[in-house]
Amino acid sequence: MPDIPLPEDLSTYIRGMESRIRALETAPRAENTSQPWRFQSVETTFTTSSLTYVDSSPAGPSITLTLPNAGNVLVTAGAYIGLNSVNQTALVSLDINGTNYFDILALGISSGIAVTTSANITSTRVVSLAAGTYVFKLKYKVTASNANFSARALTVQPF
C-alpha cells in the first residue's frame, strides 16, 4: 500500500512534486528520429516486349527523396505481373538516379507450365546510400514475348 503523506508533510510533498514536474517540462527532448516515408502507386497496366529495362507510360511509380545523412533506405516494390508465353520471365528493376540498382521483382514461366501465368508479387530490400537527393523508379523488361504490369507500387523509407 502506498505511503499517504500526513497533513504536516503535505506541503513538502506538493513542493517536491512541483519541482519534479518542472524538471520534466525542461528536460532535453529526444531527437525526432521518425523518418518520412514516401509511397506512390500506378494502377494502369503497362505492357512491354522490351528486352532491356524501360520506363512505363504513364511513368511510375517514381519517388524523389532527400537524405540529409548517409544511411539505409527500406524499399518495397510490388506489381501484378501477367505473362503469356512459355520460357518467359518478366523483371522489374529498382532504378536509383538513372542506374539499375538490382532486380527487385521477377516472375517466370518455364516449359511445361500453362501459357498464361500471373501473380501479385512484392519484395522489400534495404539500400545503403550517402547523403543526397535520390530518384527511385521502377523499370520493366521481359526475356521473350510481352508482359503486363499493373497495380505497380513503390514505397521508400529512410531509417
Image: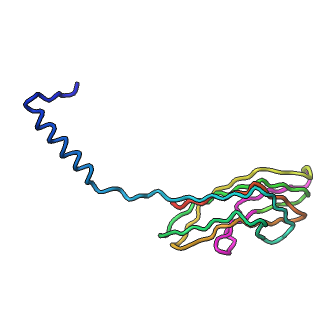
> Could you tell whether 72 is left or right of 39 in the image?
left
Residue lying at 23% horizontally and 45% vertically, measured from the top left: 21
> Could you tell whether 64 is left or right of 18 in the image?
right
Residue 46, x across and y down, in percent: 81, 61
Q: Main secondary structure of the magenta part?
A: strand
Identify the image's colour scheme: rainbow, by chain, secondary structure or one colour. Answer: rainbow
Residue lying at 22% horizontally and 49% vertically, measured from the top left: 22
How many marks are shown on the rendered structure? 0
Residue 97 falls inside the magenta stretch: yes
Outermost residue toward the top in this view: 1
Residue 94, x across and y down, in percent: 68, 66
Task: Please say if 8 is above or below 107.
Answer: above
Q: Can you tell which quarter of the image residue 37 is in?
A: bottom right
Q: Can you tell which quarter of the image residue 15 is in?
A: top left
Residue 47, x across and y down, in percent: 84, 62
- Rendered-image quadrant of the N terminus: top left
Task: Please state the extent of the stretch shown in magenta in the rendering.
Answer: 92-112
> Could you tell whether 82 is left or right of 100 in the image?
right
Outermost residue toward the left in this view: 8
